[in-house]
Image: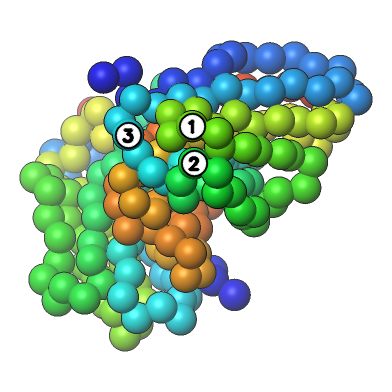
Amino acid sequence: AQTVTQSQPEMSVQEAETVTLSCTYDTSESDYYLFWYKQPPSRQMILVIRQEAYKQQNATENRFSVNFQKAAKSFSLKISDSQLGDAAMYFCAPPRGSQGNLIFGKGTKLSVKP
Amino acid sequence: NAGVTQTPKFQVLKTGQSMTLQCAQDMNHEYMSWYRQDPGMGLRLIHYSVGAGITDQGEVPNGYNVSRSTTEDFPLRLLSAAPSQTSVYFCASSYRAGGQETQYFGPGTRLLVL
């Protein structure tokens, strides 16, 4: 069965510092996409970054980057120069089966201290 | 574009009542899905659709019905509400299957079943 584990229920980072959120997953698919979504207190789900599994290069999006280890099924999110607006729940979302759906982790709550 | 819209934003039901949660998107996306979010559980897939006239079950389909008569609309029906269905419900859409493309989420519907 497809599973996803976000082992850090809560994390805290000082403003302007760097933080890494971890995610491990299990899938039998060979070609797939992985996502990190952000959910601020407004509850709106917002895409942070997307990684294509067949690409060896780690995805980056401004201050956000991933460390994707396909063999280890690890997909961590690094946030550089943290800002107060980064405070939110972060969900890792690997593939769920072969039907093109996602499975979401339980999330990591990130706090940013001024 | 309005993106993905959901109505109502908040609803209180009594056990045994039925209701329909509305979801619409104006991006001509083929793939639409419904998730529920419970505290500490992340998002769980209820039902999804890969196009008009095609629906399938997700991870937690019991107690919910869906239909997809048009590309734009994907309503979720609760046939006989139960307290266990108290949750926040999100509708999402994407151009292709949600595991391949960025999913765009609606603002959510908060449902309380007494």
> Residue at label 3?
B28
Mark 2 or mark 1, earlier in chain: 2
Q: Quadrant of residue A38?
A: top left
- Mark 1 and mark 3 residues within 8 Å of each other at the beta carbon: no
User: How far across and down, in percent of the image, does residue B35 sit?
Assistant: 56, 41
Q: Quadrant of residue B22?
A: top right
- Mark 2 and mark 3 residues within 8 Å of each other at the beta carbon: no
Secondary-structure class at tag 2: loop
Crowding at dot 3, Cα within 10 Å, few <14 / some 14-19 / many 20+, comes out as few
Mark 2 or mark 3, earlier in chain: 3
User: How far across and down, in percent of the image, does residue B25 sit?
Assistant: 39, 27
Question: Is B78 rendered above or below residue A25?
Answer: above
> Residue at label 2?
B52
Please give the chain letter of the residue carrying mark 1: B
Determine if residue A11 is in view: no
User: How far across and down, in percent of the image, does residue B48 sit?
Assistant: 55, 47
Amino acid of disc 1: Thr
Q: Quadrant of residue A33?
A: bottom left
Residue at x 81% of width, y 31% of height: B79
Determine if residue B25 is in view: yes
Amino acid of disc 2: Ala
Question: Is A26 rendered above or below residue A88?
Answer: below
Q: How is the model colour-coded?
A: rainbow
> Residue at label 1?
B70
Crowding at dot 2, Cα within 10 Å, few <14 / some 14-19 / many 20+, comes out as some
- Mark 2 and mark 1 residues within 8 Å of each other at the beta carbon: yes
